Image: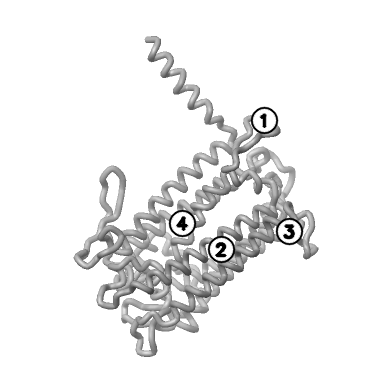
Amino acid sequence: MRAQLSVVFEAYFRLALLEIMQTYGNPNPSYGWWVGNSVVTNKAGRFIGSHVGHTGLICFATGASTLWELGRYDPSIAMGHQSSIYLAHLASMGIGFDSAGVWTGENVGFIAIFHLICSMVYAGAALLHSLFFDADLQQGPLPNTPKFKLEWDNPDNLTFILGHHLIFLGVASIWFVEWARVHGIYDPAIGAVRQVFPGYGDFARIFSHQTDFFSINSLEDVMEGHAFLAFLEITGGAFHIATRQVGEYTKFKGSGLLSAEAVLSWSLAGLGWMGIIAAFWCATNTTVFPVEFYGEPLELKFGISPYWSDTGNLSDCNYFLGHTTRAALTNVQYYFGFFCIQGHLWHALRAMGFDFRRIAKAIGGLTAATSEG
């Protein structure tokens, strides 16, 4: 139940700012001013600055959009029919309800402003990393700082950094499970917020949902799935931090292929897959995405390309070109996911050394041959 728009923003910024240009054998390539990523490719400190800056932009967009949705919210119209994406996510987490269990937007303004404040803190950190702190993390205020310097063709370095990322993600999953246990989340089956805590134990049953997870209709299964995910992420993180490359670093293990371009391609593959899965889930699942907050389930249709269509009465939908929140969120998620997959293929081929100039030359040669004929 994480906010899918965060994934969308992250995907956009990864594509816009992490585009690693091929040098095509030129040891001293030059880039235009618009290729901002060229200054962070081999400078881990600047790379962190750009990531923190991205996080600040995401926080700002989240806080500002939440205030915008709250300011024009009309209680006489279903939330799912007035493009209230951020309000819907908060309501699904049990936020915005009064003591009587009625959604009033209580505390939503505080959360929005908190995100705006965080965005300023992130912006300050981004400026510090970009302008004042060590550019490549060779030194820093902590003795372990150099360990986090990105070395694209060093598997020991990359697995060490990956391990820390996984542990943070695992902690976030545990936080969500504990939120549901202590505060409670909205259960559409009873139309109220309730505490949900299935425990941290029956992971075999959760793993059995590999083929039917779109039809999950129990919040206990949803939360136990997050607990299982936390276990995998923290265990995997500890493994990646503790282990190192075994044996010689050969081509079979990625030597010559492991690079900034390759890492970016894998990141885009993950984002693309998450976007497409989230789209299918949002389109049909009414337990995680309640009808009250997102609108009616969607129907998959095919035209020039696949898309999801509304199935309910849209007479009171005044936003999103007359569509429900569910329709907008699902279709945007799907197509962002689709284009991230295309970006993955592009960067993966470049990481493997494919020269895209050959395509232009081939087309040029074909055009010349046609003209001569």
- The label shown at residue 133 is 3
Q: Separation of disc 3 and disc 2 at Cα?
A: 18 Å
Q: Which residue is mark 1?
A: 26
Quick one: label 1, few (<14), some, or many (20+) residues within 10 Å? few
Comes first in the chain, label 1 or label 2: 1
Comes first in the chain, label 1 or label 3: 1
Q: Quadrant of residue 222?
A: bottom left
Mark 4 residue type: Val
Q: Is residue 114 left or right of residue 97?
A: right
Residue, x 64% and y 60% (percent of image)? 126
Mark 2 residue type: Gly
- Disc 3 secondary structure class: loop
Q: Which residue is mark 4?
A: 8
Q: Is residue 114 left or right of residue 366?
A: right
Q: Separation of disc 1 and disc 4 at Cα?
A: 34 Å
Quick one: label 4, few (<14), some, or many (20+) residues within 10 Å? many
Residue situated in front as seen by the camera: 46 or 92: 46
Q: Is residue 296 left or right of residue 360?
A: left
Give the quarter of the figure containing the C terminus.
top left
Q: Quadrant of residue 311?
A: bottom left
Comes first in the chain, label 3 or label 4: 4
Comes first in the chain, label 4 or label 2: 4
Q: Which residue is mark 2?
A: 56
Q: Separation of disc 1 and disc 3 at Cα?
A: 30 Å
- Disc 4 secondary structure class: helix
Q: Separation of disc 3 and disc 4 at Cα?
A: 29 Å
Q: Disc 1 vs disc 2: Cβ atoms closer than 8 Å?
A: no
